[in-house]
Image: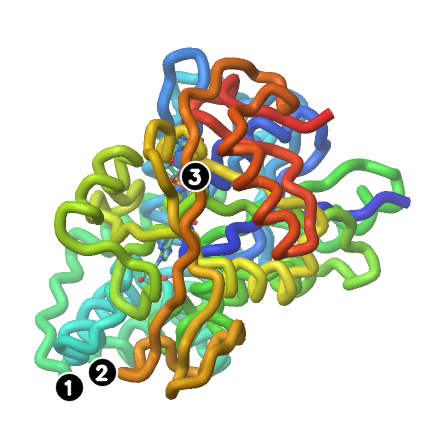
Amino acid sequence: MSKVDVLLGLQWGDEGKGKVVDYLAPKYDIVARFQGGPNAGHTLEFDGIKHVLHQIPSGVFHEGILNVIGNGVVLDPIIFQREIEDLDTFNLDLKKHLVISNRAQMIIPTHRMLDQAYELAKGDKKIGSTLRGIGPTYQDKAARKGLRIGDINEPNFLERYNELRDFHLHILERYDFEAKLKDEEEKFFKAIEVVRGFDILNTEYHINQALVDDKKILAEGAQGSLLDIDFGSFPYVTSSNTVAAGACIGLGVAPRNIGEVFGIFKAYCTRVGSGPFPTELFGDEGEELRKLGNEFGATTGRPRRCGWLDMPALKYASMINGVTQLFMMKADVLEGLEQVKVANGYTHDGQSTIELPLYMESENFEVTLNTLRGWGKVQSNNFDELPDGLVEYVKYIESSTNCPINMVSIGPDRTQTIFRN
Ligand code: GDP
Ligand code: IMO
Ligand code: MG
């Protein structure tokens, strides 16, 4: 009997999950997404190709792997159709290699409109949502109103769709939001036909049977732990459990069947959207890091806010997820800096602490920064030949998190990946 390995982001998303899932995928039989939806943008680069996936798991470019969209995902059929069409040129036999859970919640056009209406109403307290309808769809799931992908094959689907849409239209009216639905609904029903062409299954049975058959499964997280609905910087979070436990719920896997937990983090921090970011750099410093790291959102194109690595936050995320191995991304971005900084603690109401408070944006909250020496260009793909400054950085992080860094990534391409032997 095998176990499910989980790969997830330890920061505010965009750590490089897509790249690493694509890299590791050949070692697995199944790659499965367990939460989130089209708010995700996972970038893969190989053989001069750059591709961004939103809802389709990042194992899709390798032959012989089954990609599963799990029950914890919220799926937008329109975006799904677009993603399938964008993959056309790759001649992947998708109908054979991609299945969808019948229990995955469905994003309908009015969910996206509600997302916009709620954000507008929040004014300067807006979350900075990707406006993909994620929050309203999970809201309908919790309210036990939502439609699930399997419902498209039920005889009363249209009736239930109309009921949910009309309920949304009532709310939108109260928000004075003009719902332009005609085109969107047309696209939606066309897209439903595309979804119908795929196997819509009780994926939890397939996954559990695969474990019994000793098959290898990798669960691909979306967003990051600091965006988790319970443990992130609430209310500036997404609406799902992005942490490792989310893989149990989002795929139907028992906790005892979770194996390795790969925690991905950037050598610094980024965040898109609003919310606290203790180590954020502003002005020229922030701009420089954004330029060096090419930090613009893969889903919305928004500039990402940039700052130094936040150790208390990384330790917190490692603890909540039970991380067994750390993977450090984008080490190349800091190449050439004489010094790098890391937050090693906070001061909250005059007291030093390494615990994340309930609100990190409170007036009396500051970070304490530690300065470490930088590193030059990474010359070799051998872990034992990393530049001295980078080795010190790796050791510093390992000793504060008590967790090994088993991979360092030095570029967006598949080949720019250095594993420890
Ligand atoms: P994800 O959402 O976690 O999959 O990450 P994104 O794809 O949103 O953002 C990560 C970005 O960094 C993408 O543009 C990747 O191509 C790029 N990337 C990934 N790893 C590295 C790396 O080690 N170095 C550099 N320079 N870029 C990287
Ligand atoms: P990947 O999987 C980075 C952020 C949004 C916003 C907040 C809530 O590519 O790492 P939502 O649309 O979920 O209601 O937005 O979460 N956010 C992400 N930031 N990477 C992501 O996904 C994100 N998905 C959502 O910017 O602040
Ligand atoms: Mg992303």
Q: In which quarter of the image is ligand 3?
A: top left
Q: Is residue 362 visible?
A: yes
Disc 3 target residue: 373
Q: Nearer the N terminus, badge 3 or badge 2?
A: 2
Does residue 228 sit above or below 412 in this rendering?
A: below
Query: What kind of element bears circle 2?
Result: helix
Mark carried by residue 171? 2
Q: Residue at x 36, y 52 (%)?
A: 308
Q: Tag 1 or tag 3, which sits nearer the N-term? A: 1
Disc 1: which residue: 174
**Whole-Å distance between the Cαs marked 3 and 2?**
55 Å
Q: Quadrant of residue 325?
A: top right
Q: In this view, does 174 lie to the left or right of 378?
A: left
**Residue 219 visible (yes or no):** no
Describe the element under mark 1 as helix, strand or loop.
helix
Residue 381: x %, y % from top left: 57, 17
Q: Are marks 2 and 1 in contact (CB under 8 Å)?
A: yes
Give me the C-alpha separation between circle 3 and circle 1.
Answer: 56 Å
